Image: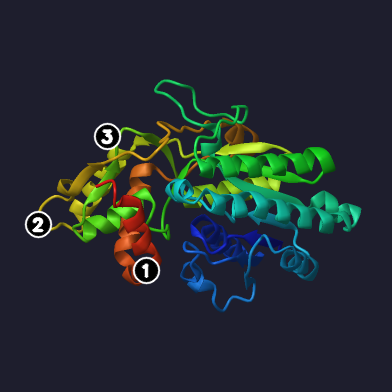
Amino acid sequence: MQTILVTGGAGFIGSCYVLARCAAGDRVINLDKLTYSGNLGNLASLRDDPNHIFVHGDIGNAELVEHLLHTYEPDAVVNFAAESHVDRSILDPDAFVRTNVLGTCTLLRTAYTWWKGLSEARKAAFRFLHVSTDEVFGALHPGDPAFTEETPYSPNSPYSASKASSDHFVRAYHETYGFPTLITNCSNNYGPRQFPEKLIPLVTLNALARKTLPVYGTGSNIRDWLHVEDHCAAIQRVLEAGRVGQTCNIGGNSERTNLEVVHGICAVLDEVAPSKEGPYADLIKFVADRPGHDFRYAINCSKLSSELGWTPTHTFEEGLKDTVKWYLDNAEWVENVQSGDYRNWMQTNYAGRV
């Protein structure tokens, strides 16, 4: 059994990772600030699990992080904690600097200081894994090769700029101090328990409510889609066997335009929850594009496949259908997250676009 300090473990991706590690018998110390997208409902099944220790707090609180490190002596830190939505970063970039840059720096500094005091054997075994995004690489055009680990950083949004900065700090702590870090850069995640500001749950829930399905621009922007369970399995594989100081790209090998994704959701709903009012695709409405909207992201994850033997197990069509059905089957979860904060955000972001 390993002890892992997970930050941001009540969010979408973090909670999936926490559930998987607890199921595998590891002890998880879960530090989460519980901002708008952090949801303890994601972890309801662990309420009585003695190996899941939840701590409400901020990675920017050095005293708290230091206390957790000394108290639980983790074998690894896995950092999911981040502000993660491009649209929100456009409206409030400072919040992304505070968490993604300054918070990560505090976490790094505190973990490194603690790590220095460990025995040589424990120092050699310890890992600090930082979870990041493919958006740090910028945008691709049709026909461009997919991002590799050697692709230069070229962030185009406040969100991706903040994540790029945090990546650089993590790398610098390895190069400067010898701190045993790992970085993963992933493509667009989807799956159960995703906060409904993101495309797939937003379209699913709007469609069920017979609301407009907003699609930016012409819907031609392309993303590579990665099921969250595949992502978390890849993270664990990198944690176990990745080369210290290295970066690994994680992708789903599933490039789709946004419009293809929306039509795919509508097709699933037409099959499993048909509406008397007509096909769900009738609700699609193209809205003004967001500023600086990158055209295409695509991940080449051949390094992860060849060196560590990981490949995604979910096809996009199967994963999308399962995800849509999850939202249909978990109405209580949906009701709980569609709070005043969520409604206010939808009004703020889309009011001037529709």
Residue at figure coordinates x 38%, y 58% from the top left: 345
Residue 218: give its label: 3
87 or 284, nearer to the observer: 87
**How far is mark 3 from mark 1, CA to CA?**
30 Å
Residue 220 in the image: state x and y as whole percent.
31, 32
Regarding mark 3 in the picture, which secondary structure is present there? loop
Q: Name the image quarter holding residue 327.
A: bottom left
Residue type of the residue flagged with mark 2: Glu
Residue type of the residue flagged with mark 1: Gly
Residue 50 in the image: state x and y as whole percent.
63, 76
The residue where tag 1 is placed is: 340
**How far is mark 3 from mark 2, CA to CA?**
25 Å
The residue where tag 2 is placed is: 277
Residue type of the residue flagged with mark 3: Thr
In the picture as drawn, the residue positioned furthest to the top comes out as 143
Relative vertical location of residue 106 with respect to residue 215 in this rendering, above or below: below
| Residue 241 in the figure: left or right of residue 334 | right
